[in-house]
Amino acid sequence: MLKIKRAHPMFTGILVTMDKYEKDELVNGMLNKNTMKGNIKLYQKVFEVGPFVKTMKPGDIVMLNLARYAHLKYEQNSIKSDIMEQKIVRYDIPTEVIDGVEYMLLQENDVVLVIDEYEEVEDSDIVVVTPEIITV
């Protein structure tokens, strides 16, 4: 068994962090199944990139699309998938442990957005709704 200390992905591969929600988080004051404890966050930090990746660099914050790693309850184009509600059962995301930290090994096309500028906002359970002013 190898204990990998440092590695880089090939071609258009990227290594990103595998941050998960530590507790259930509310979205607009409501519990969202995507932000429940243990789920992988859609926003991750790039750890390492392959030699042909031109659109991002280590340290960038990216938004992921993990749809191609999803396993659905029913097969696509089956009668059950047409009739029943199609649910994601699990994700099979390739991971690698490097120096004791688990990273996701993805491809450049799994990234939807590279976040250039952001502000961290503390979530709140209180939702403030401001009424629209209608003038006649």
Image (cartoon, grey):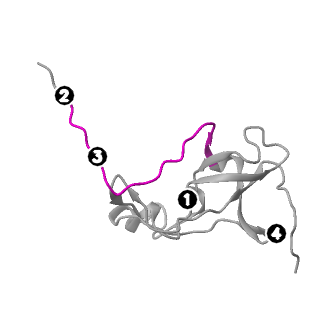
Tell me the kind of residue under disc 1: Lys
Tell me the kind of residue under disc 2: Ile
Q: Earlier in the sequence, mark 2 or mark 4?
A: 4
Q: How many angstroms separate mark 4 from mark 1 (CA)?
A: 22 Å
Residue occupying the far top of the picture: 136
Tag 2's secondary structure? loop
Q: How many angstroms separate mark 1 from mark 2 (CA)?
A: 37 Å
Labelled pair 3, 1 in contact (Cβ < 8 Å)? no
Residue depicted at x 30% and y 50%: 127
Question: Is 119 rendered above or below residue 76?
Answer: above
Question: Is 62 rendered above or below residue 99?
Answer: above
Q: Position of residue 107 (x, y in %)?
A: 71, 52
Residue to which mark 1 is pinned: 41
**Which of the 4 image quarters holds residue 82?**
bottom left
Left or right: where 65 falls relative to 5: left
Q: Residue 99 got which mark?
A: 4
Tell me the kind of residue under disc 3: Val
Query: For the magenta stretch, what is the residue range?
Result: 111-133
The reply to whether the magenta stretch includes residue 7 is: no
